[in-house]
Image (tube, grey):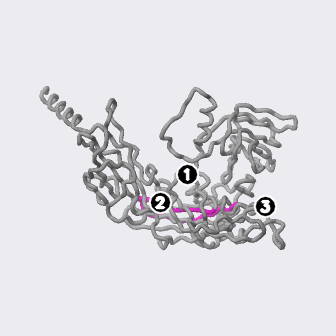
Amino acid sequence: MKSVFYFLAIVFLAVFTSCGKITPEKLTCEYMENPAVVDVQQPRLAWINVADEGERGQMQTAYQIKVASSEDKLNTPDLWDSGKVLKSESTRVEYAGQPLQSRTECWWQVRVWDKDAKASAWSEPAFWRMGILNQNEWKAQWIGAPWEGEEHFVRPDYPGQKFDEFGPPAPMLRKSFNIEKKVKSAVAFVTGLGYFEMYLNGEKAGEDVMVPNVTNYGKRPLLGEMLINVEDNFRDYKVMYLAYDVTSMLSEGENVVGAILGNGFYNPRMFWCEGYGTTRFLGQLHITYDDGSEEVIVSDESWKAAKSPILKNMVYYGETYDARLEQPGWCKPGIDAGSWENAVIREAPFGKLVAHTAPADKVMEQLQPVKMEKLENGNYFVDFGQEISGWVRLNNVSAPAGHQINISFNSNLYSGDNTYIFRGEGSENYAPRFNWFVFSGVEIKNWYGELKPENITAEFVYTDVPESAEFETSNPLFNQINDIWKR
């Protein structure tokens, strides 16, 4: 028995001492960790080499990359095996394997050799997914709500024109479909202009907010005096789409996919800035079944549309939400959508569809009030103690149906605010979807009853970029400035 123990100890020691002194970690593709979608056919790969504790002067002298179409195939990769490459590069290493097709899942690993020519262990597997590489592979159509029209919005004093600042309610879109086989995988490639949220069987897809990122969507007309149109000599028009793995959100039987659309910067509804048009949505849900067959659910005129409780949404000027107009379960199976209207086909924006490869905005932090004060006029002022970008969330509040409150943000440059109209049934929760503010405190007008600290939370919204370093000094002001700018 002892001989077996000694043998295993010797083998372990031999393996341990033969490994290199650096280990590849934090693998990225196109500067993102495990990106949900990439649309370049030679993605750039990178990793960070971490030296063993106590090691100094270590360096990478070679690397080997393996890429496969599934994690199970990494031992015998079917897409690329670089072999041992005698180079020290660990950033911007271009993929050089088999041509990548649209929607291909790519799993990869890397190992490196140190200055003593000793190889590391293989890294943990990382992942990227190819997007839709050719524009003609988009079978979906841009759709919108029939009540929005295709009008453009101009200065209110422009002859013969009318500017409707309030605007139509934000559209809700839905499509019901059936699944009768076991699902192996399902990925949705979607976008909406200006902003959108996608839902499947009542659940929101992804944690991102206010997507896609703002781009130069395309040409827009000048329909009045002094309107802003800054892209006359700029031709890099694009519209970003996102990808969501929704495999776990599907079930056998009836399923419902839906979306809510916000104006964003595509349709800013500001008299001093011309928009591109009304809101629209594009979606393509690719379902692969266990038997190898595929099905694609696309946005088209078979979708249904209804007005949401979001009566007004403007990037700078706030949101009005009437909870009495909510349709519980609007994106769940089993509801009667007979009163919904047919969606209409919208003209595609001029910009090319490209993958959303930058980190998205998310609710990254939450703050509780540091001070609450009831003012002489009966309003409440809530101080959160620091300047943030985001919004406030109301938690477990109640008031009679139709009671209206107004939330004003103390540092907002554009005098915007949010208005909430109560449903009047049980506890209610509210946060805006398609606008944000810079503020340190809010004034709440016409509150019903007593406002308690647990009823209100400030939510930090900023880009989900991983920190690569830390900064801390003995000066609290410097630390606070650093905390602000990195958000």
Left or right of 332: which side holds 401?
Answer: right
| Residue on which the image places disc 1 | 360
- Tell me the kind of residue under disc 3: Glu
Residue at screen point 66% across, 58% down:
264
**Can I make out residue 390 in this image?**
yes
- Cα separation between marks 2 and 3: 37 Å
* Quadrant (top left, top right, bottom left, bottom right) of the C terminus: top right
Q: Which residues are magenta?
A: 170-193
- Residue 168 x, y percent position in the rendering: 74, 63
Q: Is residue 397 magenta?
A: no
Q: Secondary structure at mark 3?
A: loop
Q: Earlier in the sequence, mark 1 or mark 2?
A: 2
| Residue on which the image places disc 2 | 187
- Residue 378 x, y percent position in the rendering: 85, 37
* Quadrant (top left, top right, bottom left, bottom right) of the N terminus: top left
Left or right of 378: which side holds 73?
Answer: left
Quadrant of the image occupied by residue 20 = top left
| Residue on which the image places disc 3 | 165
- Cα separation between marks 1 and 3: 28 Å
